[in-house]
Image (cartoon, helix red, strand yellow):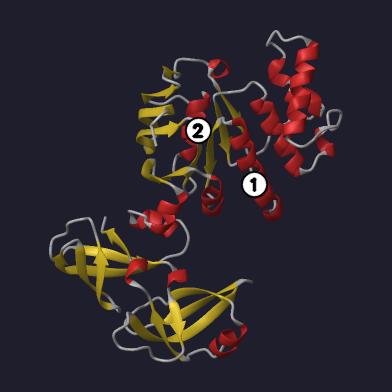
Amino acid sequence: MTSDPIVSFSNVCKQFSKIKALDNIKFDVERGEFFSILGPSGCGKTTLLRIIAGFEAPDSGEIFVDGQPILNSPPNRRPVNMVFQNYAIFPHLNVHANIGFGLRKSGLSRKMSNKKINEMLELIKLPGFGNRRSNQLSGGQRQRVALARALIKQPKVLLLDEPLGALDKKLREQMQIELRILQKELGITFIFVTHDQEEALTLSDRIAVMSNGKVIEIATPSELYKSPTSHFVANFIGSMNFFKGRVTESIDKELKILVETLGDVIIKSETSLKIGSEVWIAIRPENLKILLDAPPKNRMQIGGFLGPLAYMGDRSNYYVNISNRNEPILVSLQNDDQFRSVALNSNRRVWLEWSKESLILLLKD
């Protein structure tokens, strides 16, 4: 993919008292991209968004939008607009006036303004809602109005600060789909802040994972989930089983690692590691199989005993206790009623099996 950055962060730093909210942030967002900034509360993601919008000032660094520095420009002069978590719909204005609020000083005729507002109402699937007040709208409808108000002036970049956080689960999932379709139709770059991993994976072209004011990793959703490069990212996105290991042999892009409880494993690696290097071996719960009978000895396996299980609808999470390991190993399986009825017998002897390709190598921090 040819690089065509619309937003560039250059060594952006921000400190509140003794806390580094942003620690030398430096990356690009591509034109037309749905880019998410993901991280736990307090990691700096909202601070970064507010600096782009002009509601906070950094201590140092610069931000470029379409090649132009923006930090010396007031918020209303920046080619960006923002959608907030609480929507910020004006209660004294109807839907039509809320959407058209930003056009008041644009110099457009009333006829042209009304045309643009009506086009936005069509775009957000609320035609005929122009005369409604905000208290006559559902949460999803208010969110659409907030989006339309932010988009009507056609910003180069739309900033979204956890805009779906106040919605219930079903509506949230519906709005995720609508938001993704809307962004692709308009071709406007979206920068989306969230602490919800599933939301970021669903919506994004790429994701920046933040922790303690730093960007830990930037990659596609698939890359972050299947091939994370740090323990933090692997642990933060989805569920993961971790095992401590030590490199015992390195031959032709493959490492032999002695792993706690699992014994010797072979894993492919482009990274050259010294013999004795300490590492993490990680495996997703869905990449483990539970066998009720002992498999052949030449397979990658370990025996254990079934602990409790959690029924999740289409899947169940099984917790398997292994000797010499304090915490159980989590296994996630599609529900099979026959297997589940047998597996309900807690403390039953079982075997776990995995493939070499499902193992993830992570360097110790």
Q: Which mark is residue 291?
A: none
Q: Is residue 237 above or below residue 27?
A: below
Identify the secondary structure beneath mark 1. Answer: helix
Asked whether residue 92 appears in the rendered view, the answer is no
- Please state if 18 lies on the left or on the right of 125 as rendered: left
Residue depicted at 56% across the width and 90% down the height? 342
Q: Position of residue 177 (x, y in %)?
A: 64, 47
Q: Residue at label 2? A: 49
- Residue in the picture at 43% in, 74% down: 288
Quarter occupied by residue 236: bottom left
Q: Residues within 10 Å of mark 2 (few under 14, many from 20)?
A: many
Left or right: 305 as drawn, with respect to 166: left
Q: Look at label 1 and name its amino acid.
A: Ile
> Which mark is on residue 177?
1
Residue 67 image point, x, y percent: 41, 19
Residue 267 in the image: state x and y as whole percent: 26, 67
Q: Residue furthest left?
A: 275
Total number of numbered discs in the rendering: 2
